[in-house]
């Protein structure tokens, strides 16, 4: 399957004003998400590994606790990073291709809408969609089959947070309950299935613990308050599973 990637935004981050770029890839082999459009939100001037190590990924991740602790070393990523995204894989590869000029830029509502048409859109395969002006996602999703979106920036005065679009990423049950009081739906990483808030949360149907009953492409639960449904929780997973479990259990 040939995947096509386009630049759909290049400009300042709404989180801190640093230069960022959004690369939208039509098609995916990701077994959990299914064949969704993937979107990578990256610093346009610093590779993702370096940005994570130095803390310059604040522009695309904000205060997300999973990005780890920056340090002054000359290689590697942030210390105690618990994000499930492996930076040296797709994010770094996409950044290098962007730097080589491999991707065409598409601009304007009609062109971006046409590129997203007929796909389920994953807002923020890497990076927080709230760093990007909302009109970009409005255009990409207008003709799409739907979207998934998550943000750690709920309440940030500069980021483009929107409870209608985003699941609020919560790190604890009290955090989730506060978001529910604000009318937000949440996506929460838990250490064990026993932590699920019955009556308020469901276990991610695409997760291993739920038997991978479906994919994100077909589930469509993680679309913020645009749908009326329980919030979603998932047991910590990915390459940093153990560290993530320790973080959410703290």
Image (cartoon, rainbow, N blue to C red):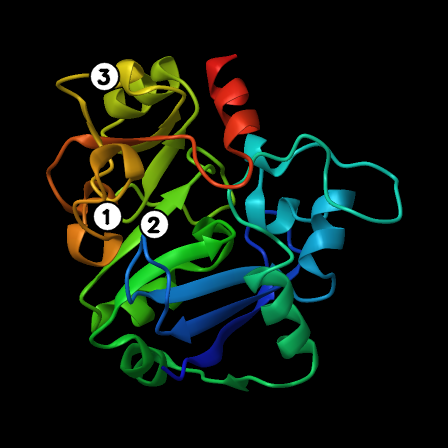
Residue 249 drawn above or below residue 44: above
Lower position in the chain sequence, tag 1 or tag 3: 3
Query: Where residue 224 sits in the image (x, y, percent)?
Result: 25, 43
Q: Is residue 182 visible?
A: yes
Residue 154 drawn above or below residue 86: above
Any mark on residue 53, and which? Answer: none
Residue contact at pointers 2 and 1, CB within 8 angstroms: yes
Q: Which residue is mark 1?
A: 223
Whether residue 250 sits left or right of residue 92 in the image: it is left
Q: Which residue is mark 2?
A: 149
Residue at x 52% of width, y 12% of height: 250
Q: Which residue is mark 3?
A: 197
Query: Where residue 161 sits in the image (x, y, percent)?
Result: 39, 45
Density class for disc 3 (Cα within 10 Å; few <14, some 14-19, many ≥20) is some
Lower position in the chain sequence, tag 2 or tag 3: 2
- Label 3: which secondary element: loop
Density class for disc 2 (Cα within 10 Å; few <14, some 14-19, many ≥20) is many
Residue at x 66% of width, y 48% of height: 57
Residue at x 40% of width, y 65% of height: 38
Residue 5 drawn above or below residue 66: below
Quadrant of residue 207 within the rendered picture? top left
- Label 2: which secondary element: strand
Which one is closest to the eye, mark 2 or mark 3? 3
């Amino acid at each position: 399957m040939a995947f096509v990637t386009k630049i759909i935004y290049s400009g300042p981050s709404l989180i801190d004003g640093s230069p960022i770029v959004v690369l939208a890839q039509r098609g995916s082999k990701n077994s959990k998400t299914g064949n969704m459009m993937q979107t990578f939100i990256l610093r346009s001037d610093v590779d993702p590994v370096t940005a994570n190590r130095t803390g310059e990924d604040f522009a695309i991740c904000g205060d997300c606790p999973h990005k780890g602790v920056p340090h002054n070393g000359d290689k590697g990523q942030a210390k105690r990073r618990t994000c499930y995204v492996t930076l040296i894989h797709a994010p770094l590869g996409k950044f290098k291709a962007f730097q080589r000029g491999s991707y065409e830029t598409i601009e304007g509502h009609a062109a971006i809408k046409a590129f997203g048409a007929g796909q389920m859109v994953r807002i923020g395969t890497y990076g927080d969609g709230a760093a990007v002006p909302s009109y970009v996602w409005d255009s990409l999703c207008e003709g799409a089959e739907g979207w998934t979106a998550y943000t750690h920036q709920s309440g940030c005065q500069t980021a483009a947070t929107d409870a209608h679009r985003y699941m609020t990423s919560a790190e604890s049950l009290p955090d989730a309950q506060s978001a529910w009081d604000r009318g937000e739906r949440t996506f929460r990483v838990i250490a064990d299935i026993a932590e699920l808030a019955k009556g308020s949360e469901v276990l991610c149907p695409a997760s291993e613990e739920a038997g991978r009953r479906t994919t994100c492409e077909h589930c469509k639960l993680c679309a913020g308050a645009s749908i009326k449904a329980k919030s979603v929780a998932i047991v910590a997973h990915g390459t940093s599973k153990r560290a993530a479990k320790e973080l959410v259990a703290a």
